[in-house]
Amino acid sequence: MYPLTLLPTPTIASSQFIRQRFREKQAMTVLNFPVEFLLVLLTLTVFLSVKKWKRKPLNLPPGRQGWPFVGETFGYLKPHPANSVGQFMEQHISRYGKIYRSNLFGYPTIVSADVGLNKFVLQNEGKLFECSYPSSIGGILGKWAMLVQVGDMHLKMRMIAFNFTNNASLRSRLLPEVERHSLLVLRSWIHGSTFSALEEAKKFTFNMMAKNMLSMDPYEAKTDKLRLEYITFMKGVISAPLKIPGTPYWKALKSRSNILSVIEEKMQERTRQMREQRDEEVDDLLSWCLKHSDLSKEQTLDLLLTLLFAGHETSSVALTSAIFFLGSCPKAVRQLQEEHSEIERKKLQRAESSLTWEDYKEMEFTQCVINETLRLSNVVKFVHRKALRDVEYKGYKIPRGWKILPVFATVHLDSSVYDDPHQFNPWRWEKNNVTATTTNNLMPFGGGTRLCTGSELAKLELAVFLHHLVLRYRWELAEPDQPFAFPFVEFPKGLPIKVYSI
């Protein structure tokens, strides 16, 4: 660079020219700098993203991410027969094994078809993993729904639900109620008539739960209206979370509001009765919550809405599945008839008109039918969990914050666990045939600290209904139908059956 003293002295014209060029250059720089900077930044981002995409983590399970944002969610949720794992699971297990990674419901996810990992996840609830359902589920069920709660709040709500369905309650209060509501439905069936078995099963389970939770009598206008609201509500739970008028999710939100209005009205009525110290004592779950729990009004509403939903939806689908599977297995129906005819004979000898707990405990083959129905129908196909910290399992790493889906259906239909797993075979559960492997791997109600509190009530409902069904009717399918996983199990046609009195 030349010394300043050697530079020529600029003229006025040249100085103006230089200043003009400087201003133009400055303007061009101001305009071009952001564009150039963004181009460099974009190039660098794409480069790093591609590099990261290509760099396979050393100890993550094999798998693929699928499309941006949605990942492989649509493929995973594609409807398929409930007594199969579906094409998506078959292909992924065949390609990657029983533990693989994916992108589901907007999150990086580990999918487990491995019985060991499924049990490991359920047994370490609150320690290594916690419940983590998509936000859309909470939007429908409510932020205080027991299904989406974790920690102390979940435990508190669980104890309330357990108080409603514990063994003492099943024996003294719920068994007579289950039998009464079973007969209310079955006695309305007309010889030679055709109807939806699913619709009848939902009437039975809903009316039973509504009576014992809210003291709502069956077949009253308000009870039937509430039941129909729950049908719309259920369709929204399994739909895309689109708050657009006319969509199932939008309709479900309206139904949720209508359901809560009914429950709130009942709550206000019950509170007024308690304040006025009326003589009548109402023995239902709502009264127990108001007297013995410290839940807020909003928490109580969400809890009751969820329990009424869960308490009738899964049980009705399981009962309909039993009717479906038995319809194609006359040998099992005959053995059921023999078992229940003997129970009925002993009951008449005692001059009793109702079933006792001892009668229920004698329904051994019936329990085999129930176990096989739950194994094949897979009413709850999988559950949602999240890793609370980095977890190592069989050499694989489950990163902190990743979702993990233990899939029960894949274990229930695994030929290495059950012989001829797609065959309805209740005899596999008989005492002389059943093995520890068979029983330990049956998880229709989940497991661990979040084992379904209504599992024993559901079995009681199925057993008592089947008792009266096989003694009173024979049935046949009126139209071809079967249970499909959407992922919640549903019968597309409602399982139309034709019944004949015995």
Image (cartoon, rainbow, N blue to C red):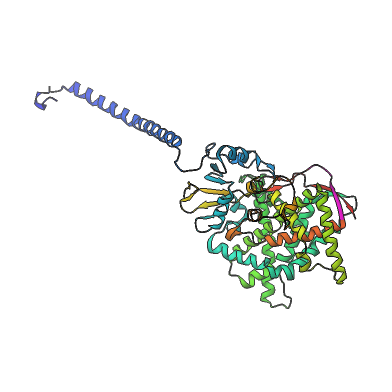
- For the C terminus, which image quadrant? bottom right
The foreground one among 11 and 103 is 103
Q: Which residues are magenta?
A: 473-480
Q: Is residue 394 above or below residue 166?
A: above
Image position, residue 226 (x, y; %): 73, 57
Residue at screen point 61% across, 48% down: 407
Image position, residue 5 (x, y; %): 9, 26
Image position, residue 88 (x, y; %): 62, 39
The answer to if 291 sits in the magenta stretch is no
Furthest-front residue in this view: 432
Residue 220 visible in this rendered orientation of the protein = no
The answer to if 479 sits in the magenta stretch is yes
Residue at screen point 58% across, 39% down: 92
Residue 118 visible in this rendered orientation of the protein = yes
Residue at screen point 45% across, 34% down: 54
Image position, residue 394 (x, y; %): 50, 48
- For the N terminus, which image quadrant? top left
The foreground one among 497 and 376 is 376
The foreground one among 372 and 453 is 372
Of helix, strand and loop, which mostly describes the magenta segment?
Answer: strand
Q: With 182 as the anchor, is 409 left or right in this view?
A: left
Residue 185 falls in image quadrant: bottom right
Q: Is residue 346 above or below residue 33?
A: below
Count the numbered circles shown. Answer: 0
